[in-house]
Amino acid sequence: MPSLLQILMRPETRRPTPPPQRVDLRRIVLVGIAAWLVALVVAVVLLATGTQGWQWVAICGAGIALGGLGLLWDRRHR
């Protein structure tokens, strides 16, 4: 196995990079949105009990909104 210095001096000696993996980005974003929805339910319950404030609900809403933007981006860049 070549040392780091040898690889930096002669990059042609390193192994070729593997091809990129195909990933279903839509499924990953949907799982993230589901996690934010669960967090939103918890935040609303904590807000109703007076334990936490509105900022946690807003953070969860922002996470859901960004997930929606991720879905739009995935649809456009398939």
Image (spheres, rainbow, N blue to C red):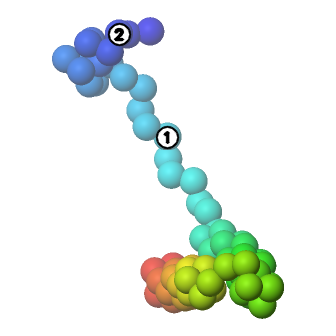
Point out residue 77 in the picture as x, y percentages from the top left corner: 46, 80
Point out residue 35 in the picture as x, y percentages from the top left corner: 72, 73
Q: Quadrant of the N terminus?
A: top left
Label 2 SS: loop
Point out residue 69 in the picture as x, y percentages from the top left corner: 50, 86
Is the residue 24 above or below the residue 20 in the image? below
Question: How far is disc 1 from disc 2 in space, using C-alphas?
Answer: 20 Å
Comes first in the chain, label 1 or label 2: 2
Q: Is residue 75 visible?
A: no
Which three-letter amino acid code belongs to the residue tagged 1? Pro
Residue under pointer 1: 18
Which of the pair 7/52 is nearer the observer? 52
Crowd class of label 1 (few under 14; some 14 to 19; many from 20; radius 10 Å): few
Point out residue 24 in the picture as x, y percentages from the top left corner: 64, 69
Q: Quadrant of residue 41?
A: bottom right
Residue under pointer 2: 3
Specify whether 71 is left or right of 52.
Answer: left
Q: Nearer the viewer, mark 1 or mark 2?
A: 2
Is the residue 67 above or below the residue 31 in the image? below
